[in-house]
Amino acid sequence: MTMPASIFRAYDIRGIVGETLTESTVYDIGRAFGTVVRERNESTVVVARDGRLSGPTLLKALSDGLRATGCEVINVGCVPTPVLYYASQAFNKCAGIMLTGSHNPGNYNGLKMVLGGVALTEAAIQDLYQRVLKGKFAHGQGGYHTQDITGDYLHDFLKAIKLTRPMKVVLDAGNGVAGEIAPMLFHALGCEVIPLFCEIDGHFPNHHPDPSDPHNLQDLKKAVALHQADVGLAFDGDADRLGVVTSQGEIIAADRLLMVYADALLKVHPKAKIIYDVKCTNHLKPVVEALGGEPIMWKTGHSHIKAKMAAENALLGGEMSGHFFFKDRWNGFDDGLYAGARVLEILATAAHPEAPFANIPNSVNTPEMKIEVDESEKFPLMQRLLDQAVFSEGELITLDGLRVNFADGWGLLRPSNTSPYLIMRFEAQNHAGLSRIQAAFRTWILSVEPALALPF
């Protein structure tokens, strides 16, 4: 049985519709996942999809595959990924699968999976791959029904968030699945809502549904200025990630936003552990420590961060891509909608909507930069680069790719787990330091693979 290994990533399954991800492959993945569920003496799987054009067809294939193993399928509809996570917990931590391409282009789709209340990561995802290759599946005839869980999600959400004053907010759904629920939710919080690209459209006609890329936030910046809003919030395609634009048009990077969250949380929960990924700023560790918290660096990836949070009993987590995880008043899963509401809570208590961001340290840094590579060569290339990495003046961290910490900054090179790229990011105290660190990385990379086209 053929199945492309490349779609089985570190924390989800992701592929190009009609090429690496077809109805047949999704059906077999459903059978493999359903078999695991049955082996756990469970039988219920909750499923959902985002607004992509391929969603209805692939969700049927997935549901059919699950039912072929004897699983009962509950379809909660076209909803954000956080609603699927919520449903899984609400239905006694039953298994769950979200059919979503997240922030990838419209021709992608994929599966984010939950088992026993825990997001699947590398070993469990590779186990699914092996099960498909062997073709050994459970057999049965499971049922299927639809159920609306959105009202319950909204009810619990509104219980967890209280704003001390009305706020004016621009919501950019990027034509993703947040477009229907986000305006409803923030209006219910008492906000004046200005919707932007809130029509769910799998063509993504206005901009790419990825708020971690500053290019995708330009329309939001203009709308915030035009409407004199307190803040602008942007969501990715399945609404588990958040981007923030201030009332003055400044884009607040996710690692800096995590420091704002940490400041608020540690006032209520002193000494709390806070998890952050390897792409985050060097400022995060000393800031969290100064606030009385315990910062812990970990691997990039929503499943990795959630697993580490559970292992450390942490109350807050975040990563540079815009995933945020709250375990103090919420359920610990990544939820861009809830993260956005927590921003409003903080801003509502401030004298001015810029104030909470004013004292966050910043530095000279780059956004994520991508080196396009062949998907099948990505991880072998990264290993060759690691094997030949020599930085005499830096501290080498191989937690996830290679991060090199210098006295005045750092550089990072790691393989993307969702796209055919190597990802780079740099930070330094000044432009001279940034140029020096980039030059050191350029020398290293090109000494191993001279043909690579570097983005700096």
Image (cartoon, rainbow, N blue to C red):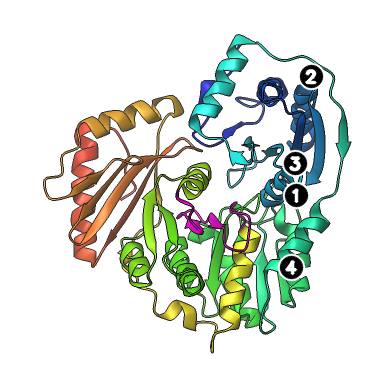
Q: CA distance from mark 3 to mark 2?
A: 18 Å
The disc, 3 or 2, on the residue closer to the chain's N-terminal end is 3
Tell me if label 1 and label 3 are in contact, CB under 8 Å. yes
On the rendered structure, is 215 left or right of 206? left
Q: Which residues are magenta?
A: 312-335
Which mark is on residue 101? Answer: none
Write down the residue under mark 1: 79
Q: For marks 3 and 4, give the one nearer the viewer.
A: 4
Decide which of 390, 308 is in the foreground and name it: 308
Looking at the rendered structure, the kind of residue marked 3 is Ala
The disc, 1 or 3, on the residue closer to the chain's N-terminal end is 3
Write down the residue under mark 2: 68
Decide which of 58, 334 is in the foreground and name it: 334
Give the main secondary structure of the magenta stretch.
loop
Residue drawn at 64 percent across, 68 percent down: 341
Residue drawn at 19 percent across, 34 percent down: 447
Decide which of 304, 310 is in the foreground and name it: 310
On the rendered structure, is 278 left or right of 178? left
Write down the residue under mark 3: 48
Which mark is on residue 158? Answer: 4
Looking at the rendered structure, the kind of residue marked 1 is Val
Looking at the rendered structure, the kind of residue marked 2 is Ala
Q: For marks 1 and 4, give the one nearer the viewer.
A: 4
